[in-house]
Amino acid sequence: MSKKQRSIDYLNKIEQVRKLGGGQILAGGLRGIEKESLRTTPDGQITNTSHPKAFGSALTHPTITTDYSEAQLEFVTAPYAENWEVIQALTELHQFVIQNNPSDELIWPASMPCMVGGEKSVPVAEFGSSNVGQMKHVYRLGLGHRYGRIMQTISGVHFNFSIPERFWPIYREAVGECSKQTDDFISQQYFHILRNLRRSSWIILYLFGCSPAICESFAVNTSELKKHNHSYFLPYATSLRMSDIGYKNDSQSSIHVSANSLSDYIKDLTQAISTPFAEYEEIGVKVDGQYKQLNSNLLQIENEYYTLVRPKRVARSGEKPSEALERAGVQYLELRALDNSLFDPVGVNRDELYFLELLIWYCLFYPSPNLCSQEEKENSDNQLLVAKEGRKPGLKLLHHGKERNLQEWASAMCEDMLPLAKILDESSANPDLNCYSNALQVQIEKIEDPEKTPSAIVLKEMQETNVSFHELSLHIAQSHKEYFSELKLSEKRKDALSQLASKSLLKQSKLEEQDKVDFDTYLEKYFSV
């Protein structure tokens, strides 16, 4: 199918959606955010303090937990019907943490880490003495041995989105797929989206990448980087977080997980978590009575596989992610390509969320043939190139084996999205705001003028004020703390979060009391299923 034919097919789908009900049938999707941030000392060094008990249990608290490090907060919102609700929930969680932290700590606003003093300065997250808590801790020890602790402190924003349930039967009939079981059809369509997100994820890095620089304490190979005031940077970078300086590394290069179907995805992921890897066997699993990793396979568990988008389903207690998917199919998608937005107190803004939702719908309606190995390589190469050189004038990406100008390609995508944005404007609870169309226009302006991208603004701020990346981020962290400190958190919400923290601590204690087997037996049983 030619580029012109794909565009025509897409526009026909949009017209079909309009006739079926337009914004009314697209309304009702749920969205949520998972946002990671380091806790730092007042001068911007990674803290060595434990996760404060005032926040609750990192193991059992549903909205305030930790990621890799004891110093790495993770804020998790519930799924909401509107983006403003997500931002409000994130704001309240930040308020609670800032206003209930017993020490004078800051929340680091950037994706790339604050000042670190080597691998040993990064405290690995602790989750208590229960078997499930020990497993989470040992898994993180393994990540440290495999990829390095400092790399694991890189933070980001994950956007979760589910298509409204009432949309699927209407769409299923419209595309003539009534022979499939409902769950199978829904999973098939989510993988349709997933493939197109792999093809187009580079645009997320270009538009929202906010990590063109790193602190000099972030130990990497700096041969290709430029130096500025105790910082390293690349002049046209958008997201070093998503480059081979950050998450993208050779360790997982041998892992290929198909996006062509749910069954292929599960099969490939299962193979990766059961395939021994010589390099990890050298680390050892249990050495001198202490666990160094859960196992020596390519992946310890499924969550170790790093990818820009994951198909997800809420798992039952004790259920692996792939088992949940196999049981009932895909429930929502998790987009993991967003940098923390340095200039937004909660790390993300409404325009980003509206555009990401728009992109997901676009990826559903746009043709999405199966991915071959050559196109997968193109996608990976495009992502890396945009992460490191996305704002370079005249930059060309690969599209079906041919070079294509980034700005021309991005502009064509946004032009295709215009009629879809108008339909989605009708689905919003605030239709007069034209929120999707307005968010799209903001992104079009960034494509036309790369200096309006967050990554360009970060470098401009560093250069014009002659400060380092660390100094800029520290100043913003201090401003954000003042912002959250001055905001009034309602007594009702404050009490609710305090009670949630207390209940989570009690829940952890009960889990620890209920364990009936030792950790060795627990692990053996977990991996034998």
Image (cartoon, grey):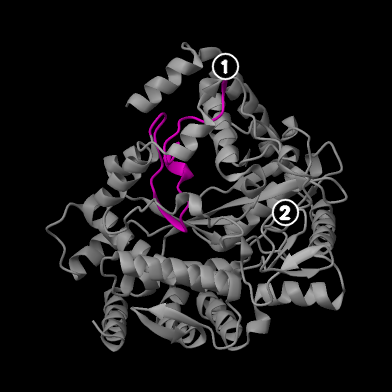
Residue 202 drawn in magenta? no
Amino acid, disc 2? Phe
Residue 316 drawn in magenta? yes
**Lateral position of residue 303 relative to residue 274, left or right:** right
| SS for dot 1 | loop
Residue 360 seen in the figure: no
Q: Nearer the viewer, residue 81 or 369?
A: 369
Q: Is residue 488 above or below residue 401?
A: above
- Quarter of the figure with the N terminus: bottom left
The spot of residue 304 in percent (x, y) is: 48, 43
The spot of residue 147 in percent (x, y) is: 57, 45
Q: State the separation of the CA atoms marked 2 and 1.
A: 32 Å
**Lateral position of residue 228 relative to residue 315, left or right:** right
Magenta residues?
A: 290-319
The spot of residue 144 in percent (x, y) is: 60, 39
Q: Residues within 10 Å of mark 1 (few under 14, many from 20)?
A: few
Q: In the rendered image, which residue does mark 2 sit on?
A: 218
Q: Label 1 near label 2: C-beta < 8 Å? A: no
Q: Main secondary structure of the magenta part?
A: loop
View extreme (left): residue: 179
Q: Residue at x 64, y 56 (%)?
A: 88
Q: Residue at x 31, y 47 (%)?
A: 268
Q: In the rendered image, which residue does mark 1 sit on?
A: 289
Amino acid, disc 1? Gly
Q: Nearer the viewer, residue 23 or 508?
A: 508
Q: Residue at x 23, y 57 (%)?
A: 185
The spot of residue 429 in percent (x, y) is: 51, 67
Q: Nearer the viewer, residue 381 or 210?
A: 381
**Lateral position of residue 523 relative to residue 510, left or right:** left
Rendering quarter of residue 142: top right
Q: Nearer the viewer, residue 178 or 213?
A: 213
First along the sequence among labels 2 and 1? 2
